[in-house]
Image: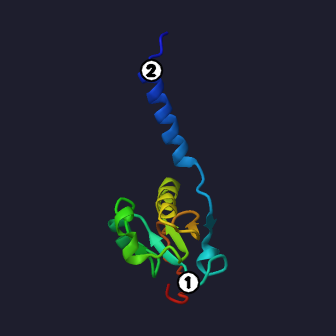
Amino acid sequence: MLITAGGLLLAAWISGYVLRLVWPVPGLKFVGEKGLRGFDLPPQTKMLDVRDASYYEECHLDGAINISLGRLPFLWHKELSPSCPVLIIANRRSAVLKAARILRRRGFKQLYALRGEACREGSSRKPCLEKGPAC
């Protein structure tokens, strides 16, 4: 079987893409629901929900800012500051990692991510983060 240069390039590109989906982001810390109550997060943490607006409207955490993942590179500066810690909320781990990479490239140092799903089906409880000083 003859492998062409184009085939090798395609295989390398696919491998790189898959690795990027699972490769950890330096400095990103995952927190559970206890973290939402302020145990693991600084008090001035902003919650960033990167899910689509329709999912956000169905169920979201009190105080969360919604900027969908596709719009994050262009709109982050309207609601967020690199000096503030940010908690990323998403439906998929790959979306959390992508959002974290976008924010890291823009100078964010304190990044957190919610472990698990923000809103579970059938759950009437919506945890919220106590607000600290505005950032």
Residue 52, position in %: x, y? 36, 63
| Res. 80 image quadrant | bottom left
The crowd level at tag 1 (other Cα within 10 Å; few <14, some 14-19, many 20+) is: some
The residue positioned 53% from the left and 73% from the top of the image is: 86
Q: Nearer the viewer, mark 2 or mark 1?
A: 2
Marks 2/1: CA–CA distance? 51 Å
- Identify the mark nearer the N-term, 2 or 1: 2
Q: Secondary structure at mark 2?
A: helix
**x and y percentages locating residue 13 in the rendered image:** 46, 35
Which disc is residue 5 wearing?
2
Q: 27 or 97, which lies in front?
A: 27
Amino acid found under the numbered disc labelled 1? Gln
Determine the residue located farthest toward the right in the rendered image.
39
Circle 2/circle 1 CB separation < 8 Å: no
Q: Look at the image and tell me whether residue 131 can be seen.
A: yes
Quarter holding residue 71: bottom left
Q: Residue at x 51, y 39 (%)?
A: 16
Q: Which residue is mark 1?
A: 44
Q: Residue furthest top?
A: 1
Which residue type does callout 2 highlight? Ala
Residue visible at 48% across and 41% down in the picture: 17
